[in-house]
Image (cartoon, helix red, strand yellow):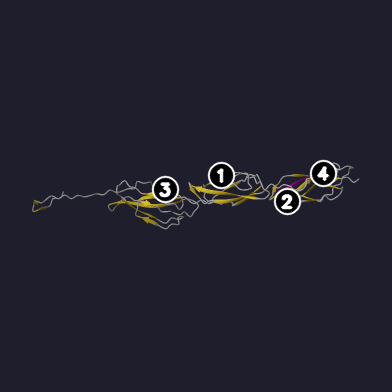
Amino acid sequence: IITPSYGGCAGTPFNLVVTVNPTSVITSVAAKTVCNTTPLAYTATSSTVGASFSWTRAVVAGISNGAGAGATALINESLTNTTTATVNAIYVITPSINGCNGTPFNLTVTVNPTAVITSAAAKTVCNTTPLAYTATSSTVGATFAWTRAVVAGISNGAGAGATALINESLTNTTTAPVNATYIITPSYGGCAGTPFNLVVTVNPTAVITSTAAKSVCDITPLAYTATSSTAGATFAWTRAVVAGISNGVGAGATALINESLDNTTTAPVNATYIITPSYGGCAGTPFNLVVTVNPTA
């Protein structure tokens, strides 16, 4: 109430109404975590009804976006993390009421990286052998999930898992290598990374297709050539000492077995060769070849 006076004479009292605005403050959360290149979807709130908001964000190392600013309650930038680890970006939000700035507020946004796989993209295994493949990522602490579809020539059904170790034993039912593709997805902080294809080549179990028996004359080259249904198979063979055959033990690593066995008796004598085919370093099914060595009458 203001009363003017003049010459000791009081004038007309006057009411002056002063509106004192409050110092507005932010009441929304002070931290948020988001996936890489995902809209922030953060809405600032204040205890002061009718408050308005402005915000700024400086350039941050590891975030490719330039500086940011806005004059809305909603902050919806999509920040791009170019590193393999989390990066924090700080927004300074200032609430206002009727042109009076309130208390500046720091919002810390943690931007998770997009995890990627760094382990090998291909592996070769023998038939029905555990894969023993461990997925790795450049992002420390990443987790992994994987799937494998049904593949023609592989008897296993579809596969899936949520571990870094993939240790399935795949069964190749054919005579040639078969490829199975695993799709591995790394994640960090609940954010899915870049899907990755692992191609697993499953070698077949090579088998012998040549005859299981042969007769030869005494001291005559055997001239037996092992064959397999798996193209490109290699062969190794052994022969133990046999009573009635003067030759010592035999062994070789060729398809051609050409020993001349000496029968020292007056009757036919059987000598057994164990032939093992291999493909890609994977041993196949051992095979018995029975050679009948006729005597020299």
Residue 249 placed where, x, y %? 81, 45
Q: Amino acid at mark 2?
A: Thr
Q: Separation of disc 4 and disc 3 at Cα?
A: 79 Å
Q: Amino acid at mark 1?
A: Ala
Residue 260 vs residue 296, the one in the foreground: 296
Of badges 3 and 1, nearer the viewer stands 1
Residue 55 placed where, x, y %? 36, 53
**Which of disc 1 and disc 4 is earlier in sequence?**
1
Q: Which mark is residue 233?
A: none
Q: Main secondary structure of the magenta part?
A: strand
Do tag 1 and tag 2 residues touch (Cβ < 8 Å)?
Answer: no
Do tag 4 and tag 1 residues touch (Cβ < 8 Å)?
Answer: no
Q: Amino acid at mark 3?
A: Lys
In the rendered image, which residue does mark 2 sit on? Answer: 234
Q: Judge from the rendering whether residue 224 lies leftward or rightward of residue 48; answer left or right.
A: right
Return the residue found at the far top.
243
Residue 260 vs residue 48, the one in the foreground: 260
Residue 38 placed where, x, y %? 44, 52
In the rendered image, which residue does mark 3 sit on? Answer: 32
Residue 160 vs residue 252, the one in the foreground: 160
User: Which residues are the magenta region?
Assistant: 271-278
Rendered residue at 40%/47% (across/down): 31
Return the residue found at the far right.
297
Q: Separation of disc 3 and disc 1 at Cα?
A: 32 Å
- SS assignment at label 4: strand
**Which of disc 3 and disc 4 is earlier in sequence?**
3
- SS assignment at label 2: strand
